[in-house]
Amino acid sequence: MTDNIFSSYKTLMTRTKDLIVLSSAGAIIQWDMETKMPPKAVEQRSQQLALLSRISHKMSTAPENGKLLNAILTNPKYDELGEVEKRNVYLIKKGYDEQTALPEKLVSDIAKQQAITVNTWKKAKKQKNFAMLKPELEKLVALSKQEAQILMQVKETATPYDALLDDYEPKMTSEAIAATFNQLQQGLAKLLEKIQNSHNQPDTTMLRIHVSVEKQRKIAQALTQTLGYDTVSPTAGGRIDETEHPFTSGYYDDVRVTTHYYPNNYASAIFSVLHETGHALYEQNINPNWKYQPIGSPCSFGIHESQSRLYENIIGRSQEFWTYTLPKLKQITAPTLANVNLSPFVHAINRVQPSKIRIEADEVTYNLHVIIRFQIEKDLFADKTAVAELPETWNQKYAEYLGVKVENDSEGAMQDTHWASGLYGYFPTYALGNIYTGQLIVALEKDVPEWRQRLAQGNLEDIKQWLTKNVYGYGDLYDPADLIQKVTGKKLDAEPYLKYLGEKYGALYGF
């Protein structure tokens, strides 16, 4: 690099570091809002978040950034920049173009309304009263539609909803998702029918044995240690807390997970901890040399979800994992689970039964929950569905796709925090993550064919090293479609995931 372009790049990266540090601080404030904040503080917190969003917006749209970007991109020596530097410049410019197009007031209004709507959602969910949430949700959706219309022009997407999707899964379109989800839904329908017709149904009574919250906390610590997520040592970069809705938040050296403990459903916390730890491992194992650079971030939410679902389901619900882990579970809960045996336990945690709650759904039907949300969101931002119609539309789709009857809106359209949080376009990444796992596992088995045998011995290091090399280590060097192509040699395809599900559940259910 010439001195001029190097100087401009260095200045731009210094300014970007400040923005990333501010964003990481905001994430901790959001975490506190979900975990430790007293109820009375919500209005005050909404003002804090609104101010942070305004500061962030001003920093990311500062004219100096535009001048630096222009100086770099028009420099005759630009092509001499390395791949990492070019990607950083691309990501900064993408964010700059999008943020400069958004009015500061709109950004602030959205941040404030998100905090208010989430707080209202919590109250409405407890009272099973969608009417209480409706006015605030309508305000947030209206603001988000304004944002989507603006970003649609900047990103040159086909629809406003595609502009929101791009925030979570760069360059992914609703058309491509719809086609892939159709492939997935057809395969799942056939598999679900076989499972439901099987006479080899599991006994799940062992999963309803009472296990105290105190012992479940110890189980959670043991699981995170097994997976390599440190929450206990003097140099730990993680922690486990308790919330209504499990999530992961943080950056590099401070990545936190949350879960929810149910005394009569100990498996719920086990799998939410495995899921969130998968997210945390991704965040903590991105190339450390890229810290405070745009490239030092996860590739996409779908790729992120592929890591959580890989640890939760492909690893966490496997016979091999529990060959090693079940004795530890028995030891922690002794003598409560003394009579639980490996094969019945593995069959029980892989029970397939259509249900109403996404986060409690089994590995097979989970994707149908996501497909429903994707279809509703798509229609919401195409003005084909109104906020007032969400409960009715939701209930109809659950009856049609899953054959279940939703009794109230708290187990229906209000069960998730995403819409109240303004995370429109997020839901599809959950199913995309599952599809990615199917493709990644094919590549893993090719490179490390004995990984399952090692897993049965409690060795997860080989898996972690492979993921660090092939997923974590790339950070945001590539868009998700390009990353999957590079790692697996294939484009987005639901077939490997459907094949994995067919083989696994065929063995469990005997067909």
Image (tube, rainbow, N blue to C red):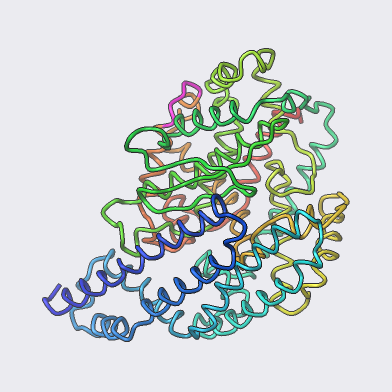
Residue 247 lies in the magenta-colored region: no
Q: Which is more toward the observer, 255 or 469?
A: 255
Q: Quadrant of the N terminus?
A: bottom left
In the rendered view, would you say 349 is above or below 470?
Answer: above
In the rendered view, would you say 111 is above or below 202?
Answer: below
Q: Quadrant of the C terminus?
A: top right
Q: Residue 390, located in which quarter of the rendered image?
A: bottom right
**206 left or right of 49 in image:** right
Residue occupying the point 46% across, 41% down: 239
Task: Give, as a single range, the part of the protein colored magenta.
Answer: 456-460
Residue occupying the point 60% across, 65% down: 423
In the rendered view, would you say 320 is above or below 183?
Answer: above
**View extreme (left): residue:** 3
| Residue 52 x/y as whole percent | 44, 71
Residue occupying the point 68% across, 47% down: 359
**View extreme (front): residue:** 40
Residue 458 lies in the magenta-colored region: yes
Q: Which SS type dominates the magenta stretch?
A: loop
| Residue 103 x/y as whole percent | 50, 86
**372 left or right of 229 in image:** right
| Residue 78 x/y as whole percent | 22, 77
Count the labels in the image.
0
Q: Which is more toward the observer, 7 or 235?
A: 235
| Residue 197 x/y as whole percent | 85, 35
Residue occupying the point 70% across, 68% down: 377
